[in-house]
Amino acid sequence: MAIMKSRIITTTVAVLAMSMLAGCLRTETDPSPSHINPNAPIVPLEDDREVYDNEVPGVLNLYVEVLPGGATIEEVDDDTDWTDDSIPEANVRVSEDGYTFGNGSTSSDAKLRQRGHSARSAAQKSYRIRFDDESTEWRDLNTLELNKHPYDLSRMRQKLSFTYFQSISDFTSLITQFIHLYIDGTDYGLYTLIERCNEEFLQRHGLDEEGHLYKAEDFAFYRYPDNIMDPSDPNYSLEKFEEVLEIRGYDGNHEKLINMLDEVNDEEIDINTVIEDNFQRDNYLTWFAINILLQNYDTNSQNFYLYSPTNSDGWYFLPWDYDGAWDFYGQAQEAAANTRPRWTQGVSNWWNVVLHKRFLKDPDNVQALSDKVAELLNVFTDVETTQLVEILSGWIFDIVTAEPDITDLPTIADDIDDKIDEYVDELDRLPGIPAESYDIYADTLDRPMPVWLGDPIQGDGVIAFNWDESYDLQGDAFTYDFQVSTDPSFADADIIYESLDRESNEIEGASLDSGTYYFRVIIRGVDDPDNNWQIAFDQYEAGDNYYYGVKQFVVE
């Protein structure tokens, strides 16, 4: 589509086009009631769309002046360990061209710290700015989350996603805004402001500000009895709890969450009863289908919120963090540096999550998910995405392709002109991704599901191996190819034992001499085994090399 052959769309045209597109995408709805009657059906999730009127077309200039008495900006940038107790904060003053705060001031004092986890190792940092006075708000926000998205070549995956979400039923979006940041007069380039999810977020969006709101940190819907406890439990630890779920809403008790997890993990309760009693089905299917179409793979145990309003047993999935979506791993630099394990393709990416695993074992639910994926493909169309990418790129192109951003763009190329060409190619690639994702989803439904490999058991001169039993969504037969190798690459010359076309998920192997070995299991559908095959979740890491579906073991 050659989005950027003319390089820049004028601001006037971009604003007009954005207004037209927003009018086409948005459907005006009334905000949901703050409280839902007990014992009532779990009602559809409704977002107050008027909140997005706070977004300004284009890019806003934000100026930050570092004040005495706190950390320097260099000390803030050096805070690369998000797990320690040291959080350097700078005292700052914030202002915007032509903007006046509610108290009549043209600037406001605040605290600035670094934000993010893995992105802290990047050259360009992300920041959180919180105003000292809780009543002070910049465009209705007291906290400004400024994301650099250093690994997103397009610099628009987040904005593109949440702009789309504004138009989707049974779902929420977040306020997003492109920001050109200056700190002490130095140009820090382009940032994306994204609304913080907390009680104020719930209030702004017409949801229940007194409801439960949790951010998934390492949460696959298991029971987690050592972490997930009610505060009344004498063994309760907030730190342990938030290893799994960060509390962003009401924290008086967690009984509703615990009851839901008990039911999700109770195999005696039909999964459709679990869904009916604990979740809003359309919201769940929408969240699932969106992540499939956008290839937002890092949502199996993180990067989403769970919300439940007062006086309802219902839980809703809310979106978070889509800078890894839109085939992030297909970017030239990512594709050259990393391969992705086969199990990340299609629904098997979410198979290790107990809720999704149980849900997908019902063929009717698989069909319902397929129907939702097809329905939403008609929303994420090539035409709509092309238009939206053209608008967004028109706003940010001059900033992204200039210093300081151009040097640190994640490209294979080093030459500036070549880096710009690679950036343009990435923008041109985005509109076709949902259709490609749909094809991947459809093509992988016939594959068996991945498994976890068990620990080998040594005894009586032989070694016993086992692994989880696989599953086929279509009910088709499958077999296991078992192999042992002296090297994790499993070159033919290194394979010392194998048993192919096995129906059992355990094997008692031959005796092995002392040493280090590796084993793997490949699950193959009896129908078309060369295409319908799958690997284990396990992986072995050796330096910068990843061997997927492989487990190391040592014979003493």
Image (cartoon, rainbow, N blue to C red):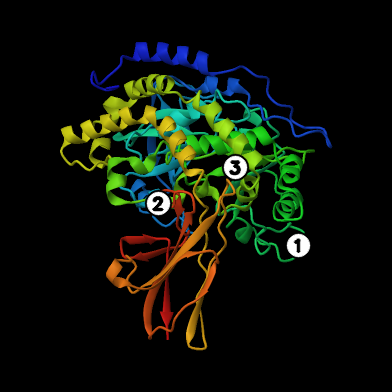
For the residues carrying marks 3 and 1, which lies nearer the camera in this image?
3
Given the current orientation, which residue lies at the most extreme right position?
A: 39
Residue 244 in picture, x, y percent from top left: 59, 55
For the residues carrying marks 2 and 3, which lies nearer the camera in this image?
2
**How many angstroms separate mark 2 from mark 1 (CA)?**
52 Å
- Residue in the image at 21% along x and 31% along y: 421
**How many angstroms separate mark 3 from mark 1 (CA)?**
24 Å
In the image: residue 24, left or right of residue 520: right
In the foreground, 441 or 327: 441
> Which of the labelled discs sits on residue 530, or is there none?
2
> Which of the labelled discs sits on residue 484, or is there none?
none
In the image: residue 168, left or right of residue 394: right
* Residue 25 visible in the shown view: yes
SS for callout 2: loop
Q: Amino acid at mark 1?
A: Asp
| Image quadrant where one finds the N terminus | top left
- Residue in the image at 40% along x and 45% along y: 68
Label 3 sits on residue:
305
**How many angstroms separate mark 2 from mark 3 (CA)?**
38 Å
For the residues carrying marks 2 and 1, which lies nearer the camera in this image?
2
In the image: residue 270, left or right of residue 440: right
Q: Amino acid at mark 2?
A: Asp
SS for callout 1: loop
SS for callout 3: strand
* Residue 200 visible in the shown view: no
Label 1 sits on residue:
233
- Residue in the image at 74% along x and 27% along y: 33
| Image quadrant where one finds the C terminus | bottom left
In the foreground, 309 or 277: 277
Answer with mark 2 or mark 1, whichever residue precedes in sequence.
Answer: 1
Crowding around mark 3 (Cα neighbors within 10 Å: few <14, some 14 to 19, many 20+) is many
